[in-house]
Image: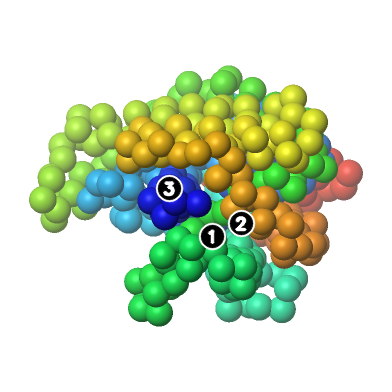
Amino acid sequence: MKKKILIGIVLVLAVSMTAPAWDVLGHAFIMEGIRGGAGMANGNELYGVTAPDFVNYLYPTPYYGFLYDQTHSDFMALYNKALTPAEKLLVVGFVAHNGVWGADHVAHSASLTIGDPTHGYVINKAMQLEAVYAYYGVWAAMGLDGADEQSAAFRLELCHNIIEYAIDIMIWSQNPGLPERVAEAAMVRAPSMGRLVVAAYADPLVAFSQGTAAPLNLAAADAILVPAEAAFRQRVITYAGLFIGATSVEEVLGRFDPYLRGLAADMFGLSLLPGQAGQLLGLALQAGLLGDLGGELLATIQYVGKNLADNGIGYNGPGKSNKPTAPKGILKK
């Protein structure tokens, strides 16, 4: 493969999904598990559990790091703004995603089952995938085999993103109806999601922005937050569509390939040869790194569900919990 084409694939993978933990299907699977199994979660819950990552659409701005921390650490700000029944479903999903004691904490910071409490599951697998690619000469072929810290960090970020795609492909292979439920959830999610995002994060964003080179007023903050969430919603629909109706892993990899090539053309003006992005994903799947995924997901479902109940996160509003009751799932409506 030509070096410039390979590097284009790397950049697309790294930038198109900046710093999530579980990806869309991973989060949706966890939410459905908390609610009792496939098809048990409401559409607003399914969309809500993915929604904290809408801030990835603000990556090039000076507000990205602040807003990522807000949505993943100050998640109760949004939970406490819910007024309607639909909003209360959205915010329970939103909180389940969090990076403090939610699903992202397991993926990024502390795996529950693989004997590595110092790294999240996704990060641990990304480190393993980096070694696999090195063994097969991928980094050398890409010109990314430098020993410096920046090169090492870039390789890990690339592997981080590829692992998330690979996890979603494995989840889909066992749950082929999940992407359709996710796409429908995003299409019909409560339109007041924009109101919730603004109510929770516009004022903090304005205050933070005063210390940047691009200070905002409330109107400008609204004009940043609402379109970012809308763009993320469309991304969820498009991404889920890569899986809907597919009948084999090979078909899914084939669908991912033009998706990633389109990103390369739009973002970098690069023309990628068909099949090249799919090769990286295929190798990640064939490496056998994710044989323990089922156990980690089950442990995550139990962990997050317990934490939601213990922290009083329920569907009746702030401070009113719903205790676990089987077989309805860990949270009861």
Q: Position of residue 198 (x, y in %)?
A: 34, 34
Q: CA distance from mark 2 to mark 1?
A: 5 Å
Label 3 neighbour load within 10 Å: few <14, some 14-19, many 20+: some
| Amino acid under disc 2 | Ile
- Say the numbered circle drawn on residue 21: none
Q: Is residue 299 left or right of residue 201?
A: right
Q: CA distance from mark 1 to mark 3?
A: 20 Å
Residue 61 can be seen in this image: yes
Mark in front: 2 vs 3: 3
- Which residue is labeled 1 in the image? 160
Is the Cβ of the residue at disc 2 closer than 8 Å to that at disc 1? yes
- Which residue is labeled 3 in the image? 5
| Amino acid under disc 1 | His
The answer to whether residue 45 is above or below residue 324 is above
Badge 2 or badge 3: first in the primary sequence: 3
Q: Position of residue 253 (x, y in %)?
A: 66, 40
Q: Residue furthest right?
A: 327
| Amino acid under disc 3 | Ile
The answer to whether residue 4 is above or below residue 300 is above
Q: Is residue 67 left or right of residue 122?
A: left
Q: Position of residue 174 (x, y in %)?
A: 82, 43
- Which residue is labeled 2 in the image? 163
Q: Is residue 307 left or right of residue 154?
A: right
